[in-house]
């Protein structure tokens, strides 16, 4: 396998091995910490910012997203999530990074939180503002919020798109009050889904997903950013890319993924641990 003479920015390991080629790019995997790095990092974040979640000509994508985000099912899920944050409620402020059309913010606002979001899709921002929400167009680093001003910062399906996740998490650390909570979710490279599908897994896409993490290297990233993990979980099994597996083996594989904590998605809660 081809090796890249470059130091891993996360663990400072010096062995990066090419592992997948797809969509005109490829991934290198650090042999020290297991991080997957896209060869298209220089353009991937700009492409994600430009394309965002919705194509400019497709109002249907946006309307489907709004319908899903504001459905009774989603709102109930968000209510359950928000209840977990009660003990952290001091300044009564919550920031949702990459908030989409604002479904979570809407629920937080109804629950009495002063909720604000950032989002790279202008269409999504307009939709959220139409719901009466405060959402700023652009990435987290484009906005200047007051330091120590948030109880909660939420990043759902964002970190894999970031060119400089360490830098962005340092920003989050500054924005949170002492003892504030970071809630982060992303896909899990140390999952049963990844073992089974490898490059067929839809998230193996160097055009958009710059960094793909395991719980181990995500923990290292959070530690370097000044956070202490207080809980984590993995969930789910994705087999749609393999029809036979989806039809015959999914129930058994899903059970195995749950037992061994090898779900294809992972969620982490971490507190600001130092100044």
Image (spheres, rainbow, N blue to C red):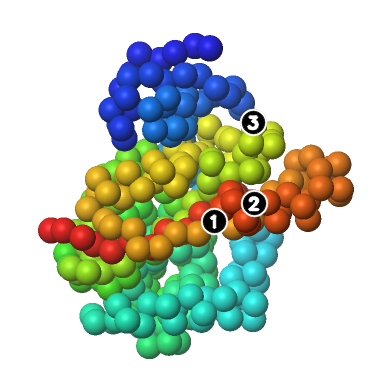
Quadrant of residue 244 within the rendered picture: top right
Residue 142 can be seen in this image: no
Between 132 and 90, the one nearer to me in the picture: 90
* Mark 1 nearby-residue class (10 Å; few <14, some 14–19, many ≥20): many
Q: CA distance from mark 1 to mark 2?
A: 9 Å
The residue located at (44%, 82%) in the rendering is: 83
* Mark 2 nearby-residue class (10 Å; few <14, some 14–19, many ≥20): some
Where disc 2 sits, the SS reads helix
Between 132 and 153, the one nearer to me in the picture: 153
Q: Which of the labelled discs sits on residue 234, or is there none?
A: 1
Q: CA distance from mark 3 to mark 2?
A: 19 Å
Q: Of label 3 and label 2, which has the lower sequence position?
A: 3
Residue 34 can be seen in this image: yes
* Residue 72 image offset from top left, x and y in percent: 64, 81
Q: Nearer the viewer, mark 3 or mark 1?
A: 1
* Residue 115 image offset from top left, x and y in percent: 36, 76
The reply to whether dot 3 and dot 2 touch (C-beta < 8 Å) is no
* Residue 94 image offset from top left, x and y in percent: 33, 73
Please tell me whether residue 251 is drawn above or below residue 48 in the rendered image.
below
Q: Of label 1 and label 2, which has the lower sequence position?
A: 1
* Residue 58 image offset from top left, x and y in percent: 65, 54
Query: Which residue matches tag 2?
Result: 257
Q: CA distance from mark 3 to mark 1?
A: 20 Å
Between 154 and 221, the one nearer to me in the picture: 221
Q: Which of the labelled discs sits on residue 20, or is there none?
A: none
Query: Which residue matches tag 3?
Result: 199
The reply to whether dot 1 and dot 2 touch (C-beta < 8 Å) is yes
Q: Nearer the viewer, mark 3 or mark 2?
A: 2
The reply to whether dot 3 and dot 1 touch (C-beta < 8 Å) is no
């Amino acid at each position: 396998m081809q090796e890249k003479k470059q130091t891993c920015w996360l663990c400072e390991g010096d062995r990066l091995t090419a592992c997948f080629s797809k969509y005109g790019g490829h991934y290198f995997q650090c042999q020290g910490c297991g991080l997957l790095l896209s060869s298209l990092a220089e353009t991937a974040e700009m492409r994600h910012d430009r394309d965002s979640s919705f194509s400019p000509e497709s109002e249907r994508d946006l309307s489907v997203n709004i319908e899903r985000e504001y459905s009774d099912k989603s709102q109930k899920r968000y209510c359950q999530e928000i209840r977990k944050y009660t003990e952290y409620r001091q300044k009564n402020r919550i920031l949702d990074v990459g908030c989409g059309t604002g479904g979570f913010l809407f629920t937080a606002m109804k629950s009495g939180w002063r909720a604000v979001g950032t989002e790279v899709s202008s269409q999504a921002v307009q939709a959220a503002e139409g719901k009466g929400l405060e959402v700023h167009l652009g990435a987290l680093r484009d906005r200047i919020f007051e330091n120590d001003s948030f109880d909660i910062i939420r990043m759902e399906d964002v970190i894999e798109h970031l060119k400089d996740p360490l830098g962005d998490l340092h920003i989050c650390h500054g924005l949170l009050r002492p003892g504030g909570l970071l809630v982060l979710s992303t896909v899990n490279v140390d999952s049963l889904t990844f073992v089974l599908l490898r490059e067929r897994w839809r998230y193996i896409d160097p055009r958009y997903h710059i960094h793909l993490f395991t719980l181990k290297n995500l923990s290292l990233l959070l530690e370097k950013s000044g956070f202490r993990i207080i809980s984590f979980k993995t969930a789910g099994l994705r087999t749609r890319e393999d029809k036979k597996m989806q039809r015959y083996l999914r129930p058994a594989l899903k059970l195995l993924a749950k037992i061994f904590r090898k779900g294809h998605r992972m969620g982490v809660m971490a507190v600001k641990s130092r100044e």
